[in-house]
Amino acid sequence: MKFIKKCPVVILLISIGVLLTIVGAAGRRTIYADQEYDPLKKPVLSIVFTAINDAIYPWELFIHENQEVMARGDVQETEELSEEGSDGENQPGEEGIPAITPSPSPKPTPSPEPTPVPEAPLERLEPLRESTHEEYLNHISADIYGDAGTKRAAEYEFATVDESYFDDALFIGDSRTVGLRDYTDLSEHADFYCETSLTIYKVMEENFDGQGTVEEALSNKDYGKIYLMVGINELGRGTTEDFMEKYTEVVDTIHALEPDARIFIQGIMRVSGKKSNSDAIFNNSNINARNNAIATLADNKQIFYIDVNEVVCDEEGNLHEDYTFDQIHLLGAYDEIWKQFLLEHGVVE
Amino acid sequence: MVSFSSLEFIFRFLPIFLIVYFATPVKYKDIALLAGSLIFYAFGEPVFIFVLIFTTLVNYLLGRQAWKLGEGFLVQDWQNKKRKRLVIGTIIFDVLVLAVFKGLATFADSALLPLGISFYIFKMISFQADVLRGEIWSMPKLRSTALYFTMFPQVTSGPIMRYNEGEFGWEKSSSLEKFEEGLKYFILGLGMKVLLADRLAILWNDLQMIGFQSISTPLAWFGAAGYSLRLYFDFWGYSLMASGLLVMLGYDFIENFHHPYAAKSIADFYRRWHMTLGSWFKDYIYIPMGGSRCSKGRLILNLALVWILTGIWHGNGYNFIIWGVVLGLFIILEKLFYGKKLQKIPVIGNLYVLLLIPLTWVIFAITDLWQLGIYFGRLFPFIGGAGIAVNSQDIIRYAENYGIYFAAGILLCIPAVFEYYEKHKKSLIVILLLVIIFWFSIYHLSISAGNPFMYLKF
């Protein structure tokens, strides 16, 4: 007892530490299988915390154990799956793997005949190949569509419009769109449903700062244009296929909810060369691959693809160094360029 | 790993080191700490550790020689002269080493600045000066001198302890109670760094992301206040961790901050901020040059020199020199004109400090002079104009996001709060609070992978 009185903090820290270590070690192969762990750099107990951050709580260990007793065979299977299929959303690769540019895949399907103003909506393109397991493991977004989609989408002749065009527009996006909202006067016309760290996986669930969900927004007001820019936060998560599947689902859902609205898929804004060359995940090769994918959704009738990178990038296709401080976001003063780009990419028919 | 607020340090280096240190017999504890310190430093600086070792040996050998010349009751004149020459020679060597590396870092590549060199060279200079003044009682041994220069709780960022404060070679009075006390300081420091300073750092990063030309004037002031708090908790937190570690090992606590934001003048502020650096400049530059017991002209010169040197010491940009000059200027003005009056009128002195110090921190923060000009333009829009694409409502969002950190930070700036802690640190509530602070900090460190900016999602 005397001992405890002398150093209660030491004893409490050590006992809690031991307890957390036991929890971490016990769940290492089950509930914590997806948590990245390097024994040289981190204690086992840190995975308990990273998991809490992913909304996996220690008590799930017991639930998991119960399930294990009930259905042993099934668990074996999920375990294998989860070990293989750890998505790296919250732990972007620390392996420092150099960004390998996906080899330009041969294009067996010739790009469609150039029709200046297609009467019928464009068909959705199929991927040319699959992501490889290696690309998946190294967080490389494979360029599985090539540039057929972006080229086809760019054939549409956009019109220059004035600001009142945005009176029935809705912008959905991550922190880049937050910048567009806060540092241009677009928000005087359009509605903004944007949130830092938004991903395509959360677009339909997110309750935007108390404004409500996208679905509620669409039911409350008739929007004529819906702009979407998401995709940078989830660059480290899943494959191009995973991303594309979800993106397609979101675009189709929005289209079904607001069939008359034109949907503008905005290409993910690139990062600066400095960032791109030094980051295994947040680099322009990954961004371009994903942009090539989502561009294929454009039918140039109801769904359009526009790419602001045309006006904010340098000759090498990287976000212009002068336009950014943190190599990712436009400085407030340069959001105006984006707004001008949007004004020049209206659809009026 | 060289950061105390990292999982590697707290869960890998520290436990292993502590087990070895406490398992070592008292006689050899110094050696255990010395070995641990060199390993610690080598993790952060595998190449430049040779600079540390080389300067340590030079300072030890020449310092011991000088010490011997001052030994005994009848020290001859020639001995004194030789001792002085020796010490001055060594100090010149130390200054040159520091100047060369600072120069390389400024003009060639900032990676060429060895970790902690500004701190350990200052310790070496202080050691030589103390030898000359006869303030080191027993002949310095290699192990205690090397330990003094390299000890891991201080080698990267101070506090700049004096050789005598370490009582090297004495039996350390380590005990469970002392260990517990040191650990409490460490946890407080960790919490300040991880839960406050690292959160507030994101605010400053946000302002840079937006671009200074586009922030509103209220946000510019909010940012300056946020930066002032962040710097304080970053450095005070670090100092508490460093001193806490030493207390755990059996040394005495070294105070490096004493409620600076409660000061009533700039001079008073710097008697309370980074105190070990301030007293170093006072004891080894200001007083040897005559201090304040001289003509007014000389006093101005002394203060100006001390503050220009302070500016240069802090970083490799012109902004640091401007920062030092501005501080020196106010301190000279206080000394000559209104310093005493400020101390007497309570609120005015506090307001004066709380207004001026954040402005000087802005100079400290922004190394690009052009950007610095833009920031001051936003702080004082009647000089700087309207800015570009300014969102006048921005302050609302930032006040919402960071209000909680400001509230906690301001609370901790009030001396009474810390005094309450000192009085009640054995109460159950404080103990539980510390345990929560520790594990909450570890939670933050775990999910941010050691880099607070990993929080920044786009």
Image (cartoon, helix red, strand yellow):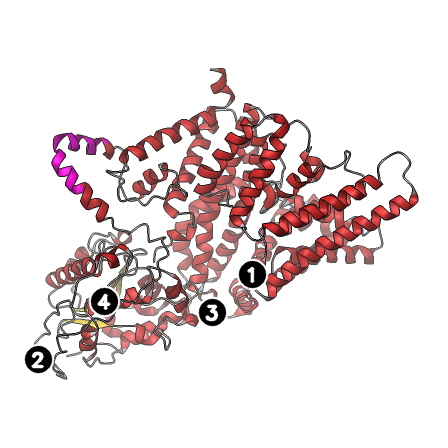
- Classify mark 2: helix, strand or loop: loop
Q: Nearer the viewer, mark 1 or mark 2?
A: 1
- Classify mark 3: helix, strand or loop: loop
Marker disc for residue B387: 3
Q: Which residues are magenta?
A: A62-78
Mark 3 residue type: Gly
Main SS of residues in magenta: helix
Q: Are marks 1 and 3 in contact (CB under 8 Å)?
A: no
Classed neighbour count for the residue bearing mark 1: other residues with Cα under 10 Å, few (<14), some (14–19), many (≥20):
some
Q: CA distance from mark 4 to mark 3?
A: 42 Å
Q: Is residue B71 visible?
A: yes
Marker disc for residue A143: 4
- Classify mark 4: helix, strand or loop: loop
| Chain for numbered disc 1 | B
Mark 1 residue type: Ser
Q: CA distance from mark 1 to mark 4?
A: 38 Å
Q: Nearer the viewer, mark 2 or mark 3?
A: 2
Badges 4 and 3, same chain: no
Badges 4 and 2, same chain: yes
Mark 2 residue type: Glu
Q: CA distance from mark 2 to mark 3?
A: 48 Å
Q: Is residue A73 one of those drawn in magenta?
A: yes
Q: Nearer the viewer, residue B432 or B338?
A: B432
Classed neighbour count for the residue bearing mark 2: other residues with Cα under 10 Å, few (<14), some (14–19), many (≥20):
few
Q: Position of residue B167 (x, y in %)?
A: 69, 32
Q: Which residue is mark 1?
A: B110
Question: Which image quarter: residue A201?
Answer: bottom left
